[in-house]
Amino acid sequence: MSLSTCPCGRPAVITLRYKHVSLCDLCFKKDVEERAKAVIRSSIPPGAKAVAALSGGKDSSTALYLTYKLTRGLNVEITPLLIDEGISQYRPHTVKRARELADMLGLQLVEVSFKEAFGFTLDDLDKAIPSKAIRKTCTYCGVLRRRLLNVYARKLGAQVLVTGHNLDDLAQTYLMNLMRGDLYALAKLGPYTRPIREKLVPRVRPLSRVPERESAAYAMLAEIPFSLAECPYISGFRPKVRELLNEVEAEKPGFKLGLVELVEKKLIPKLRELYRGEERLRSCRICSEPTTTEICKVCEMLKEAKELLSSRKASD
Amino acid sequence: MLIYVELEGKRLELTLPDGAKLADLYKAAKINREVYLAARRGRLLPDEAKLADGDEIKMIRVVSGG
């Protein structure tokens, strides 16, 4: 036999270097499910209504599938929610996969587009952003997408919003906040963020202990419909931090997990203590959504976006 | 032995010593194993998988997103 074997005796399909083990398909899936179950069972109560952000990519598809599988029998109502930003080179492939997964699980997919919510697509906005602008398309997209997820999760009556953030995403976010010195932002993070205000739906991240590579492997082995297409607008600091972390992880397996656990177990509890009572959230003067400033980031960006789109129109 | 590697749409030919494992391929081709999953004939492989002359290994890029 040319393959290495799993401790159970079956041929291994993946090596988890940070655990010093190679596992077969069945043991690997079970291992991932146990990690996800620890998160899901501690944060989604029986009978709850959950909205799951679904893009059709590997992570949100795996997170939805695991939430569905691991809450079976607990009377949890799950609604997948897809935000279509209007990225013609990318989104149609992922939307197709998202619809396939929702059909496979017998769930009703709710689709919301930037076009209907904001009046423009991300492609429209990208064309209007000058190449030298500090704020890139990706920055607008992240802020606007997160707003729609929260607003629609709330409209759908969700007690929790399930997202596909994996261990790599968290390691990147924590490191980026540390590098920026934004400890207040760090204090608000963690595996299960309770609502500070009623308007913010708490997030549940079933893949918070599952590295990105394993999220993809799970999706493949469980035969979940998903797309590996990459967004054409990826830019900014995060890809650099991702590359840095992957280089370190290759040399020091377990580095990302160690970083995430250190931040969540040692740092975030101390920071929450530090910021306790410092209620910095208020309602945006324009849209009434929660914000830490007089006008929220979404309203600020929408104003900018509309100005950019108007000047583009005028110059055409 | 000769190993064919499909990486980012390109086909590479790599000569590895007999008895080489997937981990040796990652090292020889300078591929960061955190970024890819390796598959042979559609089946995922662990790092210790022994390679054989003429093997075709597909590197599936799994790191993406904004």
Image: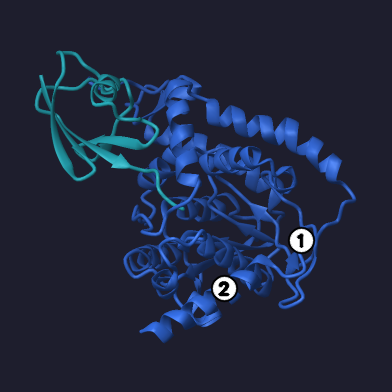
Chain colours: A blue, B cyan
Q: Chain of mark 2?
A: A
Which disc is residue A121 wearing? none
The N terminus of chain A, quarter of image: top left
* Callout in the foreground (1, 2): 2
3D distance between C-alphas at marks 1 and 2: 19 Å
| Residue B43 shown left or right of residue A172 in the figure | left
Q: Secondary structure at mark 2?
A: helix
Q: Residue at x 42, y 20 (%)?
A: A7
| Residue A57 shown left or right of residue A114 in the figure | left
Q: Is residue A313 above or below residue B24?
A: below
Residues at badges 1 and 2 in contact (C-beta under 8 Å)? no
| Residue B30 shown left or right of residue A19 in the figure | left
Q: How many badges with numbers are in the image? A: 2
| A42 or B59: nearer the viewer | B59
Q: Is residue A208 visible?
A: no
* Whole-percent x, y for residue A73 in the image: 62, 55
What type is the residue that disc 1 sits on? Thr
The C terminus of chain A, quarter of image: bottom left
| A55 or A140: nearer the viewer | A140
Q: Which residue is mark 2?
A: A304
Give residue A172's quadrant in the image. top right
Q: Residue at x 44, y 23 (%)?
A: A17
Q: Is residue A223 visible?
A: yes
* Whole-percent x, y for residue A220 in the image: 35, 46
* Whole-percent x, y for residue A140 in the image: 53, 64
Q: Residues within 10 Å of mark 2 (few under 14, many from 20)?
A: some
| A148 or A15: nearer the viewer | A148
Q: Which residue is mark 1?
A: A292
The mark that comes first in sequence, 1 or 2, is 1
Q: Is residue A199 above or below residue A65?
A: below
Q: Chain of mark 1?
A: A
What type is the residue that disc 2 sits on? Glu
